[in-house]
Image (tube, rainbow, N blue to C red):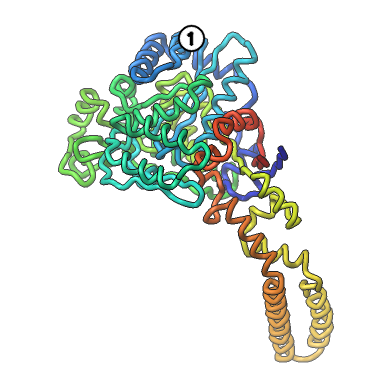
Amino acid sequence: MQIHRLPHTTTKRLPDLVSRVVSADPALAGFYRPFANQPDAVHVQQQEKRFTAQQRLTLKEVLTAQYKHISNAPTNQFESLLSSKTFTITTGHQLNLFTGPLYFLYKIIDVIKIANQWNALQDGNTYVPVYWMASEDHDFKEINHFSVNGQTIHWSRQQHGPVGRLSTEGLDQVLKVWKHHLGDRPHAEELQDLFAQSYVAHSNLVDAARYLVHQLFGRYGLVIIDGDTPRLKKEFVPYLQRECEEELIQKGSQTTVEKLNNALQTKIKVQVNPRNINLFYMGESGRQRIEKTTTGYGVVDTVISFSKKELIKEIKSHPERFSPNALFRPIYQELVLPNLVTVGGGSELAYWLQLSEVFASFDLPMPMLKLRSSVLLISNKQQQKLKKLDISVADLFLPTNEMINRRVRQISNIDIDLGEFKAHLDQQFGALYALAQQTDASFLGAVEAQEKKQKKGIDRLEKRLLKAQRIKLVDHVNRLTELQQQLFPMGDLQERRVNFAEFVLQFGDDFIPFLMKHIDPNEKDFMCFSL
């Protein structure tokens, strides 16, 4: 197997703020805990002191209840969480149909391998990998599909409320479409059975997703948790109340962003804009945002309203009806887990970086932040094409036109670069400007106008020459474009578009063990594996 490493600065796929995290920009010191290859002793002590025995018992009992229909549940992990010396390594993700894009797997593999590496230190602590299910999210369109071999499988239905609570009705019909698409290809039956056992055999999406992820990663000790549960929400009550009374998310996030702007001497792009109330209400109408009104609080697009006193009473009586938004959810996660590391994508880490003042306001320690691994999987056949076309993997990350133009310039039997002619023009017009200085201003303007005209003419000739050579080399251009489209479907990263089933069809049960073996959470570059 060949491995190519590309710095994230080369791929240009990360938000600028997260690129600074990857490059360990010293200006960001104090805004987050950077990921390290071993635990932070101070952080461990903070969590050991903060996370009570009662919280650990609640967590263990919640997990046991959520796994009650799962055979071979990781009960040893649940029991270990009772110890004050046990901590979690966590990632979160939506309940994408059949896991959705590949990077879902990469995030989970990261937390498993970090836990394994830290457990190998034998420092007296135990580290448990956790997948936090984003079951309260209500953006159905983001999760209702997955893509394999260029075809997208959709689940069409009327969405209502948090996706974790959705009935799996209709997924038996999706399975029929899935079976037709798979045909009799190798390993197709395995995938069909996995889909059926996950989605057809379970009545709601959260149970289906838990079963699926457990089948894929349960053997590696992964613990799956659903935060949409009354017992955990009960612990969240004081934080829900403070958010409503003090608007800590908005104030803390805005303060952090101002400090970031000053530290970086630039205006950062805010990933998630805070609101004065960063909560949703989950009732019969679904999951709707709560906002302040002139008389108190209202639930958007409903007739539900509260005075301040009524809202606090509702929070205390029914905390399970309240759901944090993207900026408040990290507080909930870190409250109910003895967590040390959070693994996320570029956009996720960008909004976590807005929260240092928020965590301080709630008196919670912020976890280490780890950018998830990024991987491009290249088949042997595609690797041979790369070699035959004599291009690098880095070239494939370029925009298509830029990649083609660069390659055509390299292989053309004539010199397409007219830079020498432009340099000659610069020299000639330099002499004309010197002459113009000795005459009047009108002649100087005429020289400048002629210079622009001549250079534009050279640029047009260069573009026409390049276009002509692209036509002449059309076979090479087509093969190059086809390869890029295979590896970057719809111009996007493979990991954001392709489902793991595409590779299971080729490699069967060996695919996930292959990823487990080769993905290294300590690797800071974008990894390209030639399978």
Q: Is residue 169 visible?
A: yes
The answer to whether residue 278 is above or below residue 399 is above
- Give the image quarter of residue 283: top left
Tell me where residue 393 appears, x and y as whole percent.
Answer: 69, 50
Is 49 placed left or right of 63 in the picture? right
Element marked by disc 1: loop
Tell me where residue 102 appears, x and y as whole percent.
Answer: 52, 40
Residue in front for this viewpoint, 347 or 390: 390
- Give the image quarter of residue 245: top left
Residue matched to label 1: 84
Q: Residues within 10 Å of mark 1 (few under 14, many from 20)?
A: some
Residue in front for this viewpoint, 53 or 11: 11
Amino acid on which disc 1 is placed: Ser
Is 114 placed left or right of 317 in the picture? right
Residue at the farthest left position = 303
At horizontal 36% and vertical 31% (from top left) the residue drawn is 208
Tell me where residue 434 appears, x and y as whole percent.
Answer: 82, 83
Q: Quadrant of the N terminus?
A: top right
At horizontal 51% and vertical 39% (from top left) the residue drawn is 500
The answer to whether residue 352 is above or below residue 385 is above
